[in-house]
């Protein structure tokens, strides 16, 4: 839905459904002289669209809970195991106790909004709304509801906490504290590559290239129903990537390889394909890795989450002048927009540098005396 002023008129456009043949959205529009008339036209178009949909909506007594169970069973065959488990847990814990017994066709935007308001402003609420929108969109496609009730709801606004990262001094202190742990090289590789914990746990020696130093991320370990499970896919399509190895990362991998060779020689370690295996040859549970890192951080006096190492990697990349597009690819983000949204605070210094470059360019192009740019915009009043 959108109301936009174009010149002296107001244009309104609404989606009224999807073409059953092409799957494309069908839109209706109107042009009005005033914004108030446009708002009235929008309400009228939506009302007419709902009426048209109700003509072919199936009159069924199916409940939201029954529809969810059927939808989730089908969707789970296409979803990653971790995603399927998360979707099921969110709906069963937070939605079904409140709305599960209602007829699916009776669930309104007011009901969904009330549920979200009770959950409060947090990431979990946003996740619940996202899953509901996906599920109810399928119900619309099947003709079991006239409109997607979650589309007209909104999650309560929340303050997103600033992502934590380590200073290089803190990172060195943590790695020094880890010097006697079996996972010490995993923590070092996390810092120097930005790999996620599940990606590190799922890394195999066949993924390491020594000729052109790099690691290829192909899989990850995720937790499903409280247990670690190997997933032969990454978090996103962009997550499958090749990450170049700087000298520090290569050193960590060589040290890990030497440690494994010693353990095998002593007979302490079973044969395993993993870069970071447990002594029994199995891969690590990501939650256990996180727990070990937390305990080590407390001993080092630097209590920050394991994921902060990944944020530190982004800081190092951007601080070294790596282009954001390349940094996003190395970090495995789905798009440059996601990278910008995630690390906006780290990009602020780069924006200031860009402003200084523009100043220097304009000074040269306009023939201003050399150094004039430095006198401008530094927060110093001119006398």
Image (cartoon, helix red, strand yellow):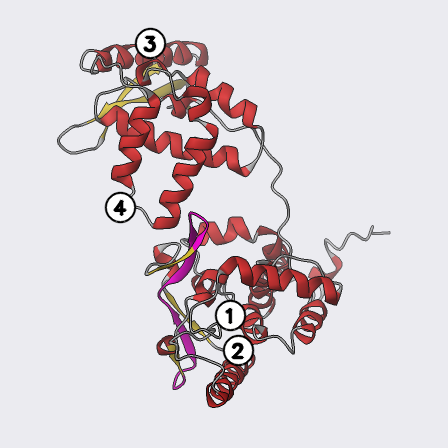
Q: CA distance from mark 2 to mark 4?
A: 35 Å
Q: Which residues are magenta?
A: 210-227
Q: Which residue is mark 1?
A: 193
**Pointer 3 or 2: first along the chain:** 3
Q: Nearer the viewer, residue 32 or 75?
A: 75
Residue 48 is marked as none
Q: Sort mark 1 into few (<14), some (14-19) or many (20+) by Cα contacts within 10 Å.
A: many
Q: Which residue is mark 3?
A: 44
Q: Sort mark 3 into few (<14), some (14-19) or many (20+) by Cα contacts within 10 Å.
A: few
Q: CA distance from mark 3 to mark 2?
A: 61 Å
Q: Position of residue 23 (x, y in %)?
A: 19, 33
Q: Secondary structure at mark 3?
A: helix
Let me know if residue 334 appears in the view.
yes
The reply to whether dot 3 and dot 1 touch (C-beta < 8 Å) is: no
Residue 78 is marked as 4
Q: Position of residue 331 (x, y in %)?
A: 47, 62
């Amino acid at each position: 839905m959108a109301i936009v002023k174009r010149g002296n008129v107001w244009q309104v456009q609404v989606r009224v459904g999807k073409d059953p043949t092409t799957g494309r959205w069908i839109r209706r529009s109107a042009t009005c002289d005033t914004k108030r008339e446009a708002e009235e036209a929008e309400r009228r178009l939506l009302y007419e669209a709902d009426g048209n949909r109700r003509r072919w909506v199936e009159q069924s007594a199916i409940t939201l809970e029954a529809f969810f169970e059927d939808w989730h069973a089908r969707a789970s065959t296409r979803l990653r195991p971790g995603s399927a488990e998360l979707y099921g847990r969110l709906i069963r814990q937070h939605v079904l106790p409140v709305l599960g017994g209602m007829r699916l066709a009776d669930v309104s935007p007011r009901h969904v909004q009330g549920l979200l308001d009770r959950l409060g402003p947090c990431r979990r609420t946003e996740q619940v709304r996202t899953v509901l929108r996906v599920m109810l969109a399928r119900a619309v496609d099947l003709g079991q509801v006239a409109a997607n009730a979650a589309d007209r709801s909104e999650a309560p606004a929340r303050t997103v906490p600033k992502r934590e990262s380590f200073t290089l001094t803190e990172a060195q202190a943590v790695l020094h504290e880890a010097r006697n742990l079996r996972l010490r090289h995993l923590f070092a590789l996390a810092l120097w590559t930005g790999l996620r914990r599940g990606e590190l746990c799922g890394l195999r020696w066949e993924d390491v290239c020594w000729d052109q130093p790099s690691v290829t991320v192909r899989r990850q370990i995720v937790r499903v129903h409280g247990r670690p499970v190997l997933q032969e896919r990454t978090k996103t399509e962009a997550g499958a990537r090749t990450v170049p190895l700087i000298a520090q990362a290569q050193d960590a991998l060589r040290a890990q390889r030497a440690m494994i060779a010693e353990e095998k020689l002593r007979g302490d370690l079973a044969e395993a394909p993993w870069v970071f295996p447990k002594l029994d040859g199995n891969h690590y549970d990501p939650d256990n890795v996180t727990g070990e890192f937390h305990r080590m951080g407390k001993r080092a006096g630097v209590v920050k989450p394991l994921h902060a190492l990944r944020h530190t990697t982004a800081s190092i990349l951007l601080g070294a002048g790596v282009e954001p597009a390349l940094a996003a690819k190395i970090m495995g983000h789905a798009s440059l927009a996601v990278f910008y949204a995630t690390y906006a605070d780290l990009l602020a210094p780069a924006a200031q540098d860009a402003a200084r470059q523009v100043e220097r360019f304009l000074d040269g192009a306009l023939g201003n005396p050399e150094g004039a740019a430095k006198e401008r915009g530094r927060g110093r009043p001119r006398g």
